[in-house]
Amino acid sequence: MISVNENCFFLHTRHTTYAFCITKYGHPEHLYYGERLDEPDAAAAPLLALKRTAQVGSTIAYSQEDLNYSLDILPLEYSSAGCGDFRNSPIEALMPDGSYSCDFLYTGYKIMEGCHPMKTLPCATGTEDVAALCISLNDTRNEAELDLYYTVYEKTDVITRRCVLKNRSSSSILLRNLASMNLDLISQNFTMITFDGGWAKEAHIHKRRISYGITVNSSVTGSSSNRHNPGFFLAADGYTEQTGNVYGFNLIYSGNHQGLAELSGHDTVRVQLGINPHCFSFEVKPDEEFEAPEAVMTFSSRGLGGASRHFHSFINEHIVRGRWKKRPRPVLYNNWEACFFKFDEKKLLSLAKEAKGLGAELFVLDDGWFGSRDSDTSGLGDYDVNKKKLPGGLTGLASKINSMGMKFGLWFEPEMVNEDSRLYRTHPEYAVVIPGKKPNLGRNQLVLDLCNPEVRDYIVEHVGQILDSASISYVKWDMNRHITDAYSPCMKNQGEFYHRYICGLYEVLDRIFSPRPHILLESCSSGGNRFDLGMLCYSPQIWASDDTDPIERLKIQGGLSCLYPLSCIGAHVSASPHQQTLRSTQLSTRFNVAAFGCLGYELDLDNLTLAERREIKKQITFYKKYRMVFQYGTFYRLPSPKDNKVCWQCVSPDRKHSAAGFFQTLSGASEGPDVLMLSGLKRDISYTVSTKPQNLYIEQFGELTKHVLPVELNPNGLILHTANKYYTLTDCVEHYRGKGALIMAGIPLNNQFMGSYYNENTRLLGDCGSSLYIIEAEDA
Ligand code: DGJ
């Protein structure tokens, strides 16, 4: 809801209020962002405003009429340049008069029902309980206008912000920076929480106290990047996962981004988010405009978990669109880790038959199916089927998979080209290179110039043809290198390259997938190198990481879960020891972690033992039963006082069904009690809590088997090895019941194995062990 009272604007969501007013000189002054204020009126403004009763030393007065009014200390909704605000400016523009100075003053506002769509970029959608406010500002020289858009998503407690710069002069404006949003808050001793890493270690949580000066979270790789996800939080002093004031920010954009928090000498914190100004300069011609991408903000007084849950519902409601919105995601099998480039139709059909038998719903053929793509050195760009590998083509393979009762999905990497490819030999000018300079390769490949309309047409046409040539229900859209040598002959001003590339990508995605709404698109960029809200506007799920080691995934999925709902996170069970870490983990833990996401399997199913096959079948049946709870339930990162434990929980919207994961990284000797601290249940109804039964493999106990088995077996002998393929032990199953309030007070769990004895009530977790607990309302 948006209310306006004498130049004061109040934006209300269910639990939050955002307020600003227009000062006597016409600057938009930020007043408040926090818990919902009921019915504030214009009188709220002088109360909430930062007082200006004395001149702050060393400031520049905006006007000699009021020496206490300095832009440097005013909390601003947007600032200008060269008028006395020396904090980081959200705008840097070479104006028609040759100066970098600008001063935008209020001219009026407009309120619109529903969101106001953007012309050049994807943005959040929604009509019901959504309203937009546009504040119009005009530069004092009448050379440019700046529209500030605020869209209020009432039910999900999110407000989005963006701005549009319009050139109203007769000469060009050269934009070097236009942040999507500027927010000046009074300092609450904030900790900045960012999600950083690299390949195979995406989105690890990092926390640092912001201090005087600027703390930056940015990417310059051409993508939103696996180094620093665009989303971040500012958490007030004393916050926890469950309590305290937390502000969350994210950007609906997949290119170079910059988010920052600047603690000023006067203890206000300036937050900005938008396109990274690095190598950016955009010419806005007379009567043209430039749209900055949409930024997303939330506030919660319920800690990091509260802010995360706002983002989850916002993304499920207003970012993901099309046929797959809020729909169950299929359990898939992907052949990449089983085959890499080495497969033929026989191998694929054998994997598919196994996958079907286990319960998979979708078979995905990954890299290597086209051109001369037998390694990552050749073939990218040529999307003609390799008939040696697939004699019946994709049509034949897809129909065989379909007749097994599974959907068929296909991998592409359309933004790239190998030098050793027909496409590159025919059209070297399609690749991103700087004339006269030998380009740098990444994974032996070059980037295609998506700024070039001819290249976009090539991709749309060729990918489209393949998609229509067979029964394809899913696409994995990969992108496996960072951008260097940024240059396109299609533009005079190369400062526009990175932004135009991303706009080109969005155009291509739209042209390919809008006419094919049945296709589920999963985007990927060497794993989670482009895990962002821009991609989620096209692809309802994203491959989180090439690293499927469940212990690493606790950090990766745990980090991503702060910003994105589980319905968007691709998570697979792969082989052990693991490809990236060489760590051995139980099949149960690999599943238990992957269940907190969109489940898939990626290991070579032809190598499964009978016991593993049985276990996977049960896992998939179980997941299908609780899939909506895992993918769309309310998600909690549960408290765990011990460093070697991670606990997660998903709760159905009616709070009658829930699943919780209890994960142990390294086991400790003779540990004290483990307590399961559940959340989100109804306090006054009765629930049962039981462990999901799972298998233990005899071999994992080595010589210890002689203490429990009636016969003594050599741990390295053939008998134990053979028995391990067929027989398993069942891990300890616990059962509890009680009222929600009692259960949420914390359940001390059965003892773990401590080396002193074993019985069937002993939890046998060891290193990397885990359990799932199922919580059901008794009247469900
Ligand atoms: C990188 C992806 O992240 C992998 O899952 C796989 O698709 C490979 N590319 C294929 O080249």
Image (cartoon, helix red, strand yellow):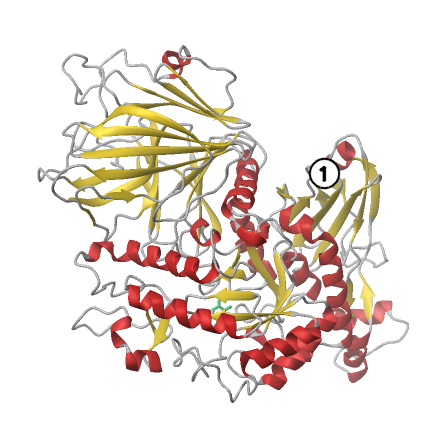
**Residue at disc 1, secondary structure:** loop
Q: In terms of depth relative to the viewer, which is nearer, 426 or 448? A: 426
- Quarter placement of the C terminus: top right
Q: Residue tagged by mark 1? A: 654
Task: Please tell me in which quadrant of the rendered image residue 667 appears.
Answer: bottom right
Q: Is residue 464 above or below residue 653?
A: below
Q: In terms of depth relative to the viewer, which is nearer, 164 or 629? A: 164
Q: Does 96 sit left or right of 281 as displayed?
A: left
Farthest residue to the left: give it. 98
Q: Is residue 678 above or below residue 26?
A: below
Q: In terms of depth relative to the viewer, which is nearer, 730 or 377? A: 377
Task: Name the residue: 18% across, 56% down.
Answer: 493
Does the numbered disc 1 mark a residue whose Cβ is under 8 Å from ligand 1? no
Residue 216 visible, this orientation: no
Q: In terms of depth relative to the viewer, which is nearer, 574 or 416? A: 416
Q: Position of residue 568 (x, y in %)?
A: 55, 53
Q: Is residue 613 above or below residue 89?
A: below
Q: Does 350 sit left or right of 53 as displayed?
A: right
